[in-house]
Amino acid sequence: MECVRRAVAVELERPPPELYAVEEPYRKIVEEVAAYVAERRTLERERYNELYRRFRKQYPLPAQLIQQAMNQGVETGKSFLELKRDGRVHKPRPEVRRVSIRFAKDSWSYKKAISSVAPVRLGLSLPGGRREIWIKPHRRFWLYWWKMLRREVELASTLVLKRRRGRWFAIFVFDVVPKREPPAEAVAFDVNENSVAVAKVSLLATVDAVAQWNRQYLNPAVYSIRTDFGRLAKRYEAVRNAKLEELKRKYPYAGRDDEEKVQNVTDTREFRKFARRLRERRRKEGRVRQIAREMTKSPALIITEELSKNPQEEMIGVEKKKVKKRELRHRVKQTPFKKLLKTIEDKAREVGSVVVYVSPYRNSRVCPTHFALLKNGGGWHDLHCPRGHAVDRDAAAVLNMLWKTTPTGWVKAVWWDVKEIGKRLKKEIVPREAVGKANPIIPRPIVHAAWTSLKALMASSQWPAVLARAAPMTPARGADEGRARAPPRPEGTPAL
């Protein structure tokens, strides 16, 4: 089974000055090799040896650092060619601004580290000899180190060092072997602007021997996880616009259409520093990881809709004729649909779960009990079934995803595809009298269980599983994970 890689960054304490002296020559080597690969699409062996000998004379670096820099330059050049082929870059050659210095297993204390119970120092081969550097371990590092001592994960032989905002970090790479456990539940989820709808069905509880004496667990648990991606984007947009109006008064020639050189307010150092302190991206990534942990608590069959390469543009293209508000288009673009799916898929590989993508065709427009087209009930989420009951749009979407994973789920196309229903009836796939009454393929107890869950589904103050607050989500007073107290939590805030 393919291993899953996890990286853990640990801050270095009092890095030596030799480490700063290595950074710039290492970056120049990476940039030169990347430009050569981008121009000629490959690096020949003869040219590799020629560049290596020249770099050895030009830069006073250890041999292994020069080799790692050249290998990293080849990777950067190939990545640049791939991006240029897709039309995502338009520069003539790659530009390397920051680099991550790689140390092979012979250039740092690899064997000593894997045999140590509590590693707190690193031995690095730098210009001038071996240097020992202290590190600041935290809770996540000790978690993976404990797993390595128990032989659940393996430590990679390459150590990565990088500098961010004046601080140096050592990045340890662990190869995690996925768990081999049978799935215990089936989970379907649907990503919306401000929430994630979830439906869970316990596979162990649906066994006949269990279901005979405890039928309440046959009902799928349908609930919503509140993310507030749209509200977060709206709030940050208002904060940025207020700052822009303030800076426009400070810079009177900004934003004018004169023939003179126009100064863009967003390019000023003051605005970029202000936007960096907002930490909008970090907060959204934190909420994405929180949802991923909720979806992958135990080995499960995870079901979701198959999205296109750019789902935001498709949603805006469909709704542009109905809703022309720029604010709504901005909120849709800021919702990380693909990022959430990739994070869940990556986390599922670690715990042994399987992600299944189903077609998004009419998931939220068909009743999961009677398989009839839903009508507008007066609200965006409230729909009305022709059989006389109300259906929540998000609940219908996740339950229909569960139906599509059944062996006979494709038979529902008889009810869904209105254009082809006449042809299918002529072929006598399903009796004509069964179309308007019920589905003869899916057992009636399961239909009754879905109907019971829909009937009991009511919005309340306790309904969201995650409460997204407008207050800062980072620990107060610089508290860090594993080294200080937990952030304050207001009273009445539900936790996962």
Image: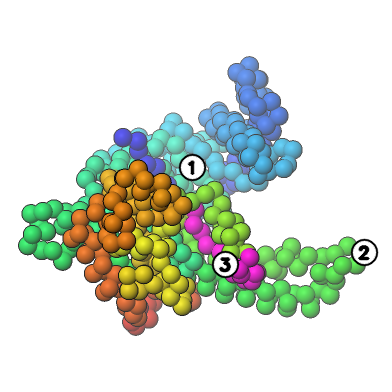
* Residue 259, picture quadrant: bottom right
Q: Nearer the viewer, residue 351 or 442?
A: 442
Residue identifier under label 1: 160
Q: Earlier in the sequence, mark 2 or mark 3?
A: 2
Real-space CA distance between mark 3 and mark 1, rounded to the nearest whole angstrom = 36 Å
Residue 166, placed above or below residue 172: below
Q: Nearer the viewer, residue 461 or 376?
A: 376
Give the mark toward the camera: 2 or 3: 3
Q: Nearer the viewer, residue 305 or 431?
A: 431
* Residue 186, picture quadrant: bottom left
Mark 2 lies on a secondary structure that is loop
- With 75 as the anchor, is 306 left or right in this view? left
Residue positioned 48% across, 60% down in the render: 285
Which amino acid is tagged 1?
A: Val
Please give the label number shown on residue 259. 2
- Our reading of the magenta stretch's main secondary structure is helix
Seen as rendered, the residue at the extreme bottom is 491
List x then y, in percent, for residue 91: 73, 42
- With 420 as the anchor, is 443 left or right in this view? left
Residue 283, placed above or below residue 416: below
Q: Nearer the viewer, residue 79 or 466?
A: 466
Real-space CA distance between mark 1 and mark 2, rounded to the nearest whole angstrom = 49 Å
Any part of residue 345 in sight: no
Report if residue 53 lies within the magenta region: no
Any part of residue 267 in sight: yes
Q: Earlier in the sequence, mark 3 or mark 1?
A: 1
Real-space CA distance between mark 2 and mark 3, rounded to the nearest whole angstrom = 34 Å
Q: Earlier in the sequence, mark 1 or mark 2?
A: 1
Mark 1 lies on a secondary structure that is strand
Please give the label number shown on residue 331. 3
